[in-house]
Image (cartoon, rainbow, N blue to C red):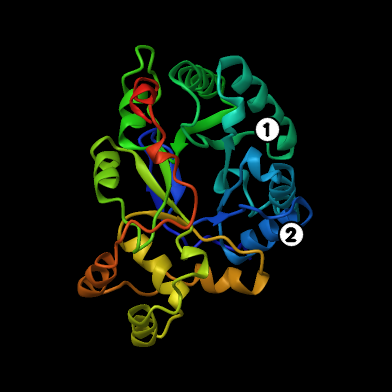
Amino acid sequence: MSNEPKAPLVKLNSGNYIPVLGIGFYLTPEDEAANIAYEALKTGYRMLDSAEAYANERGVAEGISRWLKEDPTHNKREDVFFTTKINDKFHGYEETKKALKDSLEKTNKIGYINLVLVHSPQSNYEKRHGTWRALQEAVADGSVKNIGVSNYGIKHLKELLSYPDLKVKPVINQLELHPWLTRDELVDFCRKHGIAIEAYSPLTRAKKLDDPDLVKLASKYGKSPAQILIRWSLDKGFIPLPKTVHLPRLAPNFDVFDFKLDAEDVKLLNGKNEDLKFCWDPTVYPLDNEKTEKK
């Protein structure tokens, strides 16, 4: 029997669909990534988030390939959504074309890439613009199905959306998001422009799992604090990307579709926002014309 994905799909502005829950591979060693990707797919995950900077694209693709070959009647490439990202050091038209070629070679066992994100806006206008031109060409030739950004602030999105040769809008902005970092203004801007929102570090890197209110909600719903945080992301309309290198956590992190948080509980968690970041924050990276104003 096939292992049907349980995660619902959401439509992107490109017309393509993406699962509403995925798994992140940040800092997952290459030699472990293949097995984690394979086991994640067996668990029901269908969206896997890698990056050139993570140095595990090949491993994740290997895990996908293994799963596809295991049951080619039921396990289909079109059901898997694979993401990678353009490293900041490869911004620029020619640099991005080369980086894309390298990523496609590393993942050639799965044929194409579902989504390529600009990992962050940390370069300059010319390089960011060149990167987007190269990504648009990749969409046109079919090697990449969707393109988007990560860690972009409102000013970076405004810049991108004003490119004179813009043909393909970003489908996604991937951000650190959790109840202690809700980024309401940025989220509203993305939604206004039809850009879906992926949430990385939705589990606060385990730094807030002992929060008293979170623990109470876990007890109320018969779930773990981690499951409550993933459900909060889903109820907010985000696409969460919980990351784990521990195989026993794959299933619990995916077991979040049999309940929803009451509106009052979503509001309780929203109220914890304090602009608390556990990761880097390139959303504040200055545009070129801002640099002279910085001391």
Is 152 on the left-hand or right-hand side of 191?
right
- How far across and down, in percent of the image, does residue 246 sit? 66, 69
- How far across and down, in percent of the image, does residue 121 sit? 46, 32
* Amino acid type of the residue that numbered disc 2 sits on in the rendered structure: Asn
CA–CA distance in space, label 2 to label 1: 19 Å
Q: Earlier in the sequence, mark 2 or mark 1?
A: 2
The residue nearer to you, when weighing 189 against 180, is 180
Q: Are marks 2 and 1 in contact (CB under 8 Å)?
A: no
Whether residue 292 is situated above or below residue 239 in the rendered picture: above
Residue at (57%, 63%) from the top-left corner? Answer: 44
* Amino acid type of the residue that numbered disc 1 sits on in the rendered structure: Ser
- How far across and down, in percent of the image, does residue 272 sit? 29, 67
Residue 156 is drawn in which quadrant? top left
Q: Residue furthest front?
A: 295
Residue at (36%, 54%) from the top-left corner? Answer: 238
Q: Which quarter shows the N terminus?
A: bottom right
Residue at (51%, 19%) from the top-left corner? Answer: 127
Residue at which label 1 appears: 103
Q: Residue furthest top?
A: 164
Picture disc at residue 35:
2
Picture disc at residue 259:
none
Crowdedness near tag 2: few (<14), some (14–19) or many (≥20) residues, C-alpha within 10 Å: many
- How far across and down, in percent of the image, does residue 245 sit? 66, 64
Is 204 on the left-hand or right-hand side of 31?
left
The residue nearer to you, when weighing 243 against 286, is 286
Residue 81 is drawn in which quadrant? top right
Q: Residue furthest right?
A: 31
